[in-house]
Image (cartoon, helix red, strand yellow):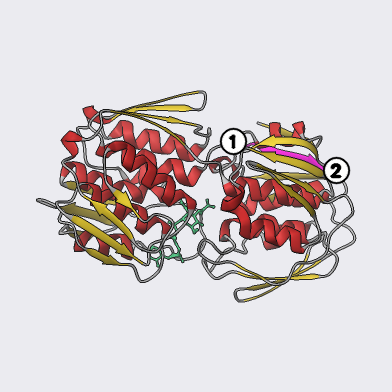
Amino acid sequence: MSILRITGGKRLSGEIHIHGAKNSVLPIMAASLLSSGETIIHNCPSLSDVDAAMKILRHLGCVAEKKDDTVYINSSTMTNCQIPDGLMREMRSSVIFLGAILARAGRAVLSMPGGCELGPRPIDLHIAAMRSMGAEIEEHGGNLICSASGLRGCRIDLTLPSVGATENSMIAAAGCQGTTVITNAAREPEIRDLQDYLRELGVPVSGAGTSIITVEGIDLSKSVKRVEHRIIPDRIVAATFLSAAAASMGKVDILGIIPEDISSILNVFTDMGCSLNVGKDWVTIDAQGGFRAPKPVVTRPYPGFPTDAQPPLMAACLKADGTTVLVETIFENRYRHVPELRRMGADIRIDGRVAMVSGVNKLHGALVAATDLRGGAALAVAALAADGTTEISELKHIDRGYDGLVESLRALNADAERID
Ligand code: EPZ
């Protein structure tokens, strides 16, 4: 069992370069199936979810290799259209392969995806979108058997702006005959990155970043044969380091980011009284003078405050002057890390979707376990602010989304080590 051991009390200082976005690279790896050639993805983080996506691609008969931060995919050799249950359960994003496999092969056999336990995570919107494009989908004992003799462009009105359903629809629409219009689409920066990749492949797509996305289907056999794409920076990793810098009352330069993509997050840290200096692709946060509780923070689809940044922010707010009110509107069960934070002396009351986080004078080290990806990151943030040593177990969750977390923390002066 691996453990992350952090002895708190050191102010973070120095600079950190933010790695590529997990939630961008995973749909783009799925979309690479649309190509009958080579996709080269740069700025790809080393994460267990990326490994899982590579395993799926290889299982489908594609070539998928990673060297440093570049992934090489050749999907011309695709032979299979079935993803076994074991691989589907490794991560939630496995469902994004549905649209890609259907568009490429006209048939897909998948089971229900896994991923963080954040409450019910249905895939009804994904299935409805594929059906409106003409796919026939049967559900048998947790398996989805999907076939389409030819997908047709259509109008897809999403009842909520699901990130995954928007991505699945865009990818499947690329292989449809005719035009697809997706309304109430998610507006996250990762959707824009997927649009950029699809355009590089030769698919006319527009509207990413707005609520209406239009995709003109193409003959996939005529897609561009070699595409190189660079993944955008991970805004949630940036939010985690902003939280870590604040919790430790440090001063950190966060480099290689797109500041506009994290403006809702930067606004909260400004509201907390942290000093922020924002450049073209960097931000410096200075929390050496302490900080106060922000106004209530409500998680919302982009451009609102992201649900994924809520747990690390909560950990930082444990050191704020005053009480922070957090309202989680995206997932029902995104406070699973709270009992673990309480072991460290946190004063947090939960009432349904509302968390009341009181600033405390002292947090203390404890033995805690990551409950999910961002909840695990929250424990690391709290550990930096705690007296004594914290040992975090269940690192498999953190490994899904943070590349080189320990090395980054150490480079920022933290007392952190990983014991495998
Ligand atoms: C993406 O998940 C992210 N994952 C999540 O990142 C993120 O928390 C989430 O978007 C919200 O921003 C990836 O991009 C790989 P959704 P996704 O579909 O696509 C409901 C992280 O920590 N819904 O936008 O699964 C759903 O239950 C994570 O990196 C339906 O009801 O999220 C939720 O309440 C975990 N039916 C809401 O929509 C559906 O068919 C938003 O989910 C689909 C979703």
Question: In this view of the protein, which residue sits in the foreground, 47 or 246?
Answer: 246
Q: Pointer 2 and pointer 1: residues touching (CB < 8 Å)?
A: no
Within the magenta stretch, is there residue 7? yes
Q: Which mark is residue 338?
A: none
**Which x, y percent locates residue 281?**
63, 41
Farthest top residue in view? 67
- Numbered disc 1: secondary structure: loop
Q: What stretch is highlighted in magenta?
A: 1-10
Mark 2 → mark 1, Cα distance in angstroms: 22 Å
User: In the image, is residue 272 above or below residue 233?
Assistant: below
Question: Is 228 situated left or right of 99 in this image?
Answer: right
Q: Which of pointers 2 and 1 lies earlier in the amino acid sequence?
A: 2
Q: Residue at x 42, y 57 (%)?
A: 163
Q: In this view, does 20 lie above or below 364?
A: above
The residue where tag 2 is placed is 11
Does the magenta run of residues contain 389? no
Q: What residue lies at 79% left-to-right and 46% top-to-bottom?
A: 384
Q: As shown in the figure, which amino acid type bears the numbered disc 1?
A: Asp
Amino acid at pointer 2: Arg
Locate the N terminus and report the quarter of the image it occupies. Answer: top right
